[in-house]
Amino acid sequence: MDSREGREHRQTTTQQEFSMNISITFPPEHKYTPVDVQQQQVAAANELFHFYTAGLVASVFVVLGIVGNILSVFVLSSKQMRRGSASVCRLLVGLAVYDTVFLFSHGVAGNLPHVLHHMGIQLGSAGAVMFSIFYPLLHISRTGSVYTTVMVTVERCVAVVKPLKAAVVFTQKRTNQILVAIFIFSVIFNIPRCMEHSLKLGSPTISVTKSVFYDTAFYTVYLIYINFIVHFAIPFTLIAVFNVLMIHTLRNVTRGYKKHDKSKAVIELNVNVGNRSSSGTGNKLCGTVLAVTSLFFLCHLVPAVALVLEQTENAKRLGDCSAACSRVSSLGDTLIIVCSATNFILYCMFGRKFRLVFQALFCPCKRRYEERRPSKKTRMLSMKSMTLEETNA
């Protein structure tokens, strides 16, 4: 009996200990499981959203944008494109170079690690070294791209509003000085970005950690307020003002063409729009300006909203804010990539001279076909002469 009672006592004690271990190791389902499942679902949905936006979609635009910007550099650097518009071509070449560096740096420091991490592949020390090199270049090239876009808008506005002063103000030497000034400003402004992270040299691997400078009050002010003013407020204001002046001038020229006789309208359009001879051409130029401006504003408005959301939630980085803020930030980064990657498409859609030079450089069959046809300039000159003869008669 004693042995039987002892066995039953030991069995009961073991069951109680096992039950106690179960209750400690695995919490009751009715208290914790729904919260855990909900958090896991939200985290999985955010991870999937970031993978498709900042991973797959952004990577596709990075590759296509690099190819398009390299082609744009070749076309814009040709003698045919620089003839009569050397200053704006130099600015556009600088813009294409900045966009190429930005896309490549973003792909190496952001898109590639994100895609590989989703696939379960870690870059290790190589990823840390690449991030420390290309992360500052990413921000330097972005600042240079923004303010080169602003200078392209200023040059275009001066060429339309004050065409006689454009050749004096934007000489080749002065354009080169503007590009150098933009580069120096971009480097100086992004010096805090270079101090944001530091490499931690370990025995097995090299890792990237946030520096002490990251937690200072100055960096918080720089990241939120100064960054918003420099990258959003100033460029938005300048591009909006100069584009409004340019569109207003082109509309006045179009109204003058409708009100005056054809001979005076032809002279007025030649002076203001650079040998443009019809109101349809002026309207098409207005459409080009509106398309470029709308793309810039759309692609940079979402990151501005994301920056405001991060500030309202007292977050410094993407992972520190809520799910909605995180998705807006990821979408904003992808739209900036889209803006830097689609300039080649805009040039081909709205620039006839760009298309012709591109065909002459990369499509020899199309070039031989165009050589057998009379050029549009020849046809327009013949139409002008006929119009003047009819007016004089």
Image: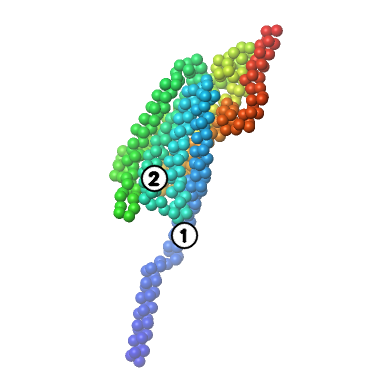
Please provide percent x and percent y for residue 355: 58, 29
The residue beneath circle 1 is 37
Q: Is residue 304 visible?
A: no
Mark before the other along the chain sequence, 2 or 1: 1
> In the orientation shown, which residue stands out farthest toward the bottom?
1
Q: Three-letter amino acid code at disc 2?
A: Met
Instruction: Estimate the spatial distance between the alpha carbons at disc 2 and disc 1, rounded to whole Å.
Output: 36 Å
Q: Is residue 134 above or below residue 150?
A: below
Q: Is residue 373 visible?
A: yes
Disc ID at residue 130 = 2
Q: Secondary structure at mark 1?
A: helix
| Residue at (34% x, 86% y) in the render | 6
Q: Determine the image quadrant of residue 191.
A: top left
Q: Is residue 346 above or below residue 27?
A: above
Please provide percent x and percent y for residue 255: 60, 18
Q: Is residue 173 above or below residue 43?
A: above
> In the orientation shown, which residue stands out farthest toward the top?
393
Q: Three-letter amino acid code at disc 1?
A: Val
Frontmost residue, 28 versus 326: 326
| Residue at (45% x, 47% y) in the render | 112
Please provide percent x and percent y for residue 369: 65, 28
